[in-house]
Image: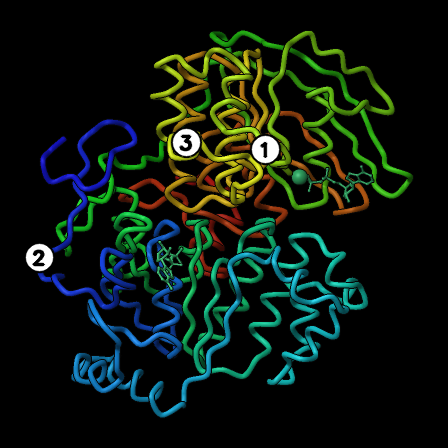
Amino acid sequence: GCGICINKCPFDAIMIIGLPEELTEPTHRYGPNAFALYGLPVPQVGRVTGILGPNGIGKSTAVQILSGTLVPNFGEGEGNWERVLEYYSGTVLYDYFSDVVDGNIKVSQKPQYVDLIPKAFKGKTSELLEKTDERGVLDELVERLDLSHIIDRKITELSGGELQRVAIAACAAKDADFYFFDEISPYLDIYQRINSAQLIQEMAEEKAVLVVEHDLAILDMLADVVHVAYGQPGAYGVITYPKGVRIGINQYLKGYLPEENVRIRPEAIKFEVHPPREETDVETLVEYNSFSKSYDEAFSLETEEGSLREGEVLGIVGPNGIGKSTFVKMLAGEIEPDEGELDLDISISYKPQYIKGDSPLQVQYFLRGISSKFDTSYFQSEVAKPLQLEQLYERSLTDLSGGELQRVAIAACLCRDADMYILDEPSAHLDVEQRSMTTRVIKRFAENSSKTAMVVDHDIYMIDMLSERLIVFEGEPAVYGKAHQPASMQAGMNQFLENLDITFRRDEDTSRPRVNKPHSRLDREQKAKKEYYYHN
Ligand code: ADP
Ligand code: ADP
Ligand code: MG
């Protein structure tokens, strides 16, 4: 280590995470040796303020302070508002907290875990939404968030993506001064993410809006400014001053915050614009014919034939309910096609989209039981460490949170010996830092072992960093889906984004993809040239 390390670096490299010198006094500490939060986000009318950082770093704590339910104590004892006003006098937060003290700040929050909503509310969607509709905007929200077909259904019967959109509508329908959305993207496809982001941007024209979001492409288009949050989850968290969204995300990716003079990660997260590989030096792993599958005449999937190459990572993209999971389940041999043969003569390790932790087995015994590979130093340093599994070894599978279970399931998939690895939505429930680590783990695993991998995901940054080629799904969700044959990233992304009617450009500094503003000059130029993703 470097001597100033506080965190243990997942890659055993040097990691300098320290507090900037001026931050000697926390904004709030829960008790002696308990979690401490340094700094606060500054919500402002007329812009979307984003928070970018891992879970457990104090984001909810900050929101409780801003909503007036937690009085910050600046390190110890009981907090009181007089001291808070004195502390912030002369700053933007002084006016804000004056309003909080006078009872003039009403807060509307969308909770992070929408899966908990059916535990608290058993009625119909319409009942839940009518109760929250203080602004009288329900009809518009129902239409914009595509909720009309589920309005008479019971909340307990909704899918994750439906619950997420109901929760966003409920939060937006309230009449508040400060809106807090604790993630909008979980369970939503890209179209739905962008749609929700646009809705929130419009709200921010007149209200203060704060958003936590772990999908960086969405955060980038949604927020005007971001506060980077860093520290040691569970121990302390620092929320920086606001930064322009482009600068903030770039600094986060590079792992270094110049204004604060703090390194938050030993290495940068890098995007490479990979050119297509020479066709001559790739061996074919397996070829498949077209096949089809339908469920009780309700949904049908058709696929084009394709061939998969040794050592490549294939991204799979498309809207929700279009048959992506059905497709990979058939490749993995979990279900049979109705028409067409699918006897792939290769072994496949598969991580399903929905994972269950229904065994009381400890994580370490579960993983060891899969393969003796688990105990190799290669697996420990390349997979277990970056996925932060060590701290979970003695926990029982039944006690894991969604994000913890996801990391264990990814490790379990990579632990098996196979010719091909299929991961269905690995980014689900992971925070931004865990997504970066997972992307890196999968990429290095495929490169080092020359194994083929398929990754279904909605996170464009993950798909962009991982994939050499793309399988694009089109059709009508819940009715009909079509899987195209594997295409180059360029051709595949162009096809996918044309359906979404959005264009991307590359950031000059980091090469990360950025959504172009609709109708901007670049957007119009790229659409005219049909260069939705790559342009010269
Ligand atoms: P985030 O929203 O970034 O995930 P939170 O603000 O929920 O983070 O929590 C940050 C840390 O503060 C966690 O380690 C949590 O256990 C701790 N914490 C939250 N509330 C309390 C409390 N009332 N007393 C003590 N510790 C708490
Ligand atoms: P995606 O992964 O693209 O979201 P899925 O393959 O999970 O899509 O589902 C495609 C469609 O098939 C959806 O309308 C879904 O409700 C339906 N479906 C999925 N599994 C079943 C099943 N076992 N029985 C009936 N319908 C199903
Ligand atoms: Mg799926």
Which is more N-terminal, label 3 or label 2? Answer: 2
374 left or right of 399? Answer: left
**Residue occupying image coordinates x 67% and y 46%:** 320
Instruction: Read off the residue under disc 1.
Output: 360
Q: Quadrant of the image for the N terminus? A: top left
Q: CA distance from mark 2 to mark 3?
A: 32 Å
**Residue occupying image coordinates x 73% and y 68%:** 125
> Any mark on residue 21, and which?
2
Which is more N-terminal, label 2 or label 1? Answer: 2
> Any mark on residue 420, and which?
none
**Residue occupying image coordinates x 47% and y 7%:** 281
The amino acid on which the numbered mark 2 sits, given as a three-letter code, is: Glu
Query: At which x and y percent is residue 376?
Result: 39, 12
Quarter-of-image position of residue 327:
top right
Q: Classify mark 1: residues with Cα within 10 Å, few (<14), some (14-19) or many (20+).
A: few
365 left or right of 447? Answer: right
The amino acid on which the numbered mark 3 sits, given as a three-letter code, is: Leu
The amino acid on which the numbered mark 1 sits, given as a three-letter code, is: Pro
* Residue, far bottom: 102
Does label 1 point to a residue whose CB lies under 8 Å from ligand 1?
no
426 left or right of 97? Answer: right
Q: CA distance from mark 1 to mark 3?
A: 17 Å
State the residue in front, 186 or 80: 80
- Which of the two marks, 1 or 3, is nearer to us in this view? 1
Q: Looking at the picture, does residue 356 appear above or below residue 123? A: above
Does label 2 point to a residue whose CB lies under 8 Å from ligand 1?
no
Q: Secondary structure at mark 2?
A: loop
Query: At which x and y percent is residue 182?
Result: 47, 61
Instruction: Read off the residue under disc 3.
Output: 389
Q: Quadrant of the image for the C terminus? A: top left
Q: Are marks 2 and 3 in contact (CB under 8 Å)?
A: no
Q: Quadrant of ligand 3?
A: top right
